[in-house]
Amino acid sequence: MAPKRRAADKRWVQVMGWIGCLTLAGSLTYTFIKALTEGAGEVDPLFFGLQTVASFFFLLYSLRLKNRIFVAANCVALLNAVGTMVVALRE
């Protein structure tokens, strides 16, 4: 009898993980670039805060999965969040 597959091994779960990871990283990168070019005053603080918290938890999940690509993408996203906060504090 074949061993039972974990939910994380299913293809649709992996695809959803990739979509979530790339969406979070992309949205925080977009927010950082927008803050650099247009100023941080245009950034919605609630949306930005929720993005950052979600990316942090996704990073913890990625570390648990030992998925280096997800870890790298979420580290970039969190660095963009820090960059956005630095831009906001300098204004």
Image (cartoon, rainbow, N blue to C red):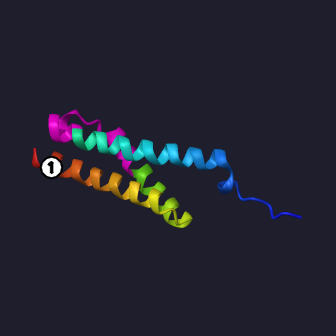
Residue 59 picture location, percent across and down: 45, 59
In front here: 14 or 45? 14
Q: Is residue 22 above or below residue 3?
A: above
Seen at 71% across and 59% down, the residue is 6
Q: Is residue 45 above or below residue 53?
A: above
Whether residue 59 is visible here, answered yes or no, is: no
Seen at 55% across and 49% down, the residue is 17
Position of the N terminus, as image quadrant, is bottom right
Seen at 18% across and 36% down, the residue is 41
Is residue 44 found left or right of 73 in the rendered image? left
Is residue 37 found left or right of 47 in the rendered image? left
- Pointer 1 residue: 89
Callout 1: helix, strand or loop?
A: helix
**Which residue type does callout 1 highlight?**
Leu
The image quadrant that residue 16 belongs to is top right
Residues rendered magenta in the picture: 34-52
Toward the left, the furthest residue is 91
Dominant secondary-structure state across the stretch colored magenta: helix
Is residue 51 found left or right of 38 in the rendered image? right
Is residue 24 found left or right of 37 in the rendered image? right
Residue 68 picture location, percent across and down: 46, 63
In front here: 45 or 17? 17
